[in-house]
Amino acid sequence: MMKEHELFAGGHRLAATTWGDVGNGQPTIVMMHGGLDCITTWKDLPQVLAEASGWPVLAYDRYGYGRSESLVGGREPSYRREEAGPVLGEVLRHFDIRQALMFGHSDGGAMAVLAAAAHPDLVFGVLACSPTIAIDQVMIDAMTGARRAFEHEGLRDKLKRHHGDNTEAMFWGWYEPWASPQALQWDMSAEIAAARCPVSVLFGNDDEYGWRSSAISLFRHGLMPLEVMALPGIGHHPQQRARGETIGMLQRLGRIGHSAPANDKE
């Protein structure tokens, strides 16, 4: 059963959607969307994850995205830590989620790993698709392409279908922190080293935002049980383009990270 919600977290009004009976002390898959995304860009994936795992799913629009409150004043790179730490903590408390499997994509994939470090007693596993964990020149160059697509190639109109009046502030709030050379100073190695729950990561080998430096950072600093897969011929959205691998990774993670095994439905 799908249900829409509104809540306040981090001092802002946020929109959320749940699939199944979230709370009640049972494990819940908590989805963190990418830097230009929101609940609706997950498409049918939340329902698919709920069916494959047997667990309820929560997805929410972060501040400035989708149906949530509009962003005012731009962002600094530190927003990732704020979102994955105190804001996510408020969201989990609101829904009475005490066992979370974090499922994140891109920007949200990096936040899912940060969340494992920030909430070690609540997060029992992480599945990150194309997480932008280490910022390198490949990603900064790709941001130029994203800006061109937004200004001249129809991306603005495509995003408006999901974000409405939030679109302009949302795009620049994502673009500006990661498009400058200062973005290369982003470093979450301490949080990677602090994470203890199992972490599974799915990359596309043809990801335009790059993936190798993020994979290296995980291997170099991670002390947790770690699975990393890079799929040939797949770009930045393996959760949509490689559903079988995504579900398989989720089910393995459920068995390793939690005593209640995920259903063995492929």
Image: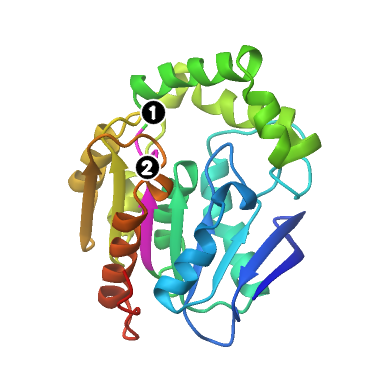
Residue count near mark 1 (Cα–Cα under 10 Å), binned few <14, some 14–19, many ≥20: many
Q: Position of residue 8 (x, y in %)?
A: 76, 61
Q: Secondary structure at mark 1?
A: loop
The dot on residue 130 is 2
Check disc 1 and give the amino acid type. Tyr
The image shows residue 46, relative to residue 157, as above or below, that is below
Q: Position of residue 147 (x, y in %)?
A: 57, 17
Q: Position of residue 189 (x, y in %)?
A: 31, 45
Determine contact: label 1, label 2, CB under 8 Å.
yes
Instruction: Assign the C terminus to one quadrant of the image.
Output: bottom left
| Residue name at image x 45 percent, y 53 percent | 104
Instruction: Assign the N terminus to one quadrant of the image.
Output: bottom right
In the picture, measured across the screen, residue 112 lies left or right of residue 167, that is: left
Indicate yes or no whether the magenta region holds residue 130. Answer: yes
| Frontmost residue, 198 versus 151 | 151
| Residue name at image x 41 percent, y 74 percent | 53
| Residue name at image x 56 percent, y 77 percent | 97
Q: Is residue 224 visible?
A: yes
Q: Secondary structure at mark 2?
A: loop
Indicate yes or no whether the magenta region holds residue 64. Answer: no
Instruction: Return the disc, 1 or 2, that comes first in the chain's sequence.
Output: 2
| Residue name at image x 21 percent, y 56 percent | 227
Alpha carbon separation for disc pair 1 and 2 = 9 Å
Which range of residues does the magenta coloring cover? 125-134
Residue count near mark 2 (Cα–Cα under 10 Å), binned few <14, some 14–19, many ≥20: many
Kindly indicate the quadrant of the structure image that contains residue 159: top right
Q: Position of residue 178 (x, y in %)?
A: 50, 26
Kindly indicate the quadrant of the structure image that contains residue 237: top left
The dot on residue 135 is none
The image shows residue 179, relative to residue 120, as above or below, that is above
Q: Residue furthest front?
A: 266
Q: Which residue, given by chain and number where applicable, does mark 1 sit on?
A: 209
